[in-house]
Image (cartoon, rainbow, N blue to C red):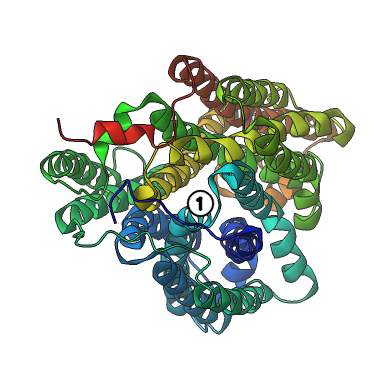
Amino acid sequence: MSSSDPIETPGRSGTRVVLALTAICMMVVGFNTTAVATILPNLKAEFDLTPSQLQWVMAIYTVTGATLVSILSRLGDISGKMGVFFFGMLVFALGSASVLFSENATMLLVGRCAQGAGAAALFGTSLSLLTAATPEDQRAGVVGIWGAIVGLAISVGPIVGGAFANYLSWRGVFAADLVLLAIAFVIGLQVSRRKYVPDTRMPGAKFDITGAIALLLLLGPLSFALSNSESHGWANARTLIPLVVAVFAAVALFLTARRNDDPLVEMRYFRHPRYVMAAAGMFITGFTLFCFFVFFNVFVQSPDAFGYNAIHAGLAILPTSVSMFIVSVVAPRVLAPYSFHWPLVFAMAAMTVGFFLLSTTSNTASYSDIWWKLVIVGVGIGLCFSLLPRLGLRLLPDEHAGQGSGVINTCLYFGATLGAVVGGVAEAVTTRSGLSEVIAALPTGSTQRADLAHALAHGSPSRVQELLAELEPPAGEALARALRDLQDNAFDSAMLVAAVGATVGLLIALWLLRGAVPPVHDATKFTQKR
């Protein structure tokens, strides 16, 4: 099929069925991304996990997903989107079953790896599959709903994980996966039988194996290095060697893309400023969202802050989740006939303001002091989730929608990974600096000084509280206040990192989104032979 051939799309009923299919699968992928973070203490206790194994319960999922999403998206373009989507459902289900029935750490990590591969296939093809099944005049609204569901699923993950862990069993998270995927599989069979998704495969197209190898060597080691940088350090060989491999692979990927007539990642699309904005904007959205999400959860669950449990911490993010969902559903329908220039500028500005406001939060604040700040953040993220994918995909021919979806979602994955890493570095640097001052202020001559210094650097919060209680009241109270202030400063540092990221996004939007709205498939002109 050539890029000029018209693509017939199903009616409204077909679009709704495809939307239901992708929505269920995105809910599964989204809440698995964050729900597992809530049940990590349960996993550690049941399987006696080492700190390294515990870290990889989360990291192996994101590393595998980020590495494979672009490759599987491109396979969807060539071999058929529905086939890759079915593959994603089956692999994710196998991974969930492995975790559900796991008896040791090995089964647990293998299952999480399979879940990551399945998530890559589902994430990489869902948006292009939905776009192909939706008439052009309805795509803005439908893509907005897709973005709303992804954002909502990520936000409710802690509530789901906390509810299962507290009231039933942590294994219920993965049992729920299997139930939802079974429903999705039945819907998928209906979609396939009734041909609700047009066939946009390219006859004679060849898969770029060299580019795929280069991409694997780029994304895999880079994800590994980012995920381990905080625990091992940037100067450690486990971080440096993967980074060097990733740099050489990036050069190889660029060179193979230039020499291949049909590359795995079409670099020439990046000549279009709005396609660059879509990719960079999703990176920044993932960066700020996870920088906020991870450290907000830690802060509100701290006994010295709000002292929430996992479920209440998830509920505390509801202002962000609800505003994200409402904006993602409504904004594309309202803004479809217009340019996305100023809405995206407003979105980045809203995130910037929201995160700067959150960076002033202290342990003396009440929830009434912050909920409206969470709404501002949710409005900004909701606009980005709903508008940026549409901004990029409308520029590409339908047969390259999978590639575009893969690029955009890869940027989201890496933004999330880097946001958690950079936020963690900012928090750790602030904490280490503050701990040095706190330890220096410990009573000299106190028999607890050495024990406190060790507990502050390496011990659990409960151990620190025990030692503080043993000090004389004035000294103990002063140190407790200092530690609460230190925690505030660490959280504020993470929010400042998110605010700076959003500010960069604001400047990029002002720069790249100037001028008139380009026509549909406008990026195709950069790939045409002259």
- Work out whether residue 214 or residue 270 is closer to the camera in this orientation and state it: 270
Crowding around mark 1 (Cα neighbors within 10 Å: few <14, some 14 to 19, many 20+) is many
* 286 over 203 or under it: above or below: above
Q: Residue at x 69, y 45 (%)?
A: 297
For residue 119, say whether it is visible.
Answer: yes
Viewed as shown, does residue 136 lie left or right of 491?
Answer: left
Q: Residue at x 43, y 60 (%)?
A: 120
**Residue 309: quarter of image:** bottom right
- Work out whether residue 522 or residue 234 is closer to the camera in this orientation and state it: 522
Disc 1 on helix, strand or loop? Answer: helix
The residue singled out by tag 1 in the image is 131
- Work out whether residue 309 or residue 122 is closer to the camera in this orientation and state it: 122
Provide residue 140's location: percent of width, then percent of height: 59, 41
Provide residue 95's location: percent of width, then percent of height: 48, 75
Residue found at the far left of this picture: 259
Q: Amino acid at mark 1?
A: Thr
**Residue 162: quarter of image:** bottom right
Q: Residue at x 43, y 56 (%)?
A: 124
Provide residue 7's location: percent of width, then percent of height: 43, 54
Provide residue 114's location: percent of width, then percent of height: 43, 71
Q: How many marks?
A: 1
Quadrant holding the C terminus: top left
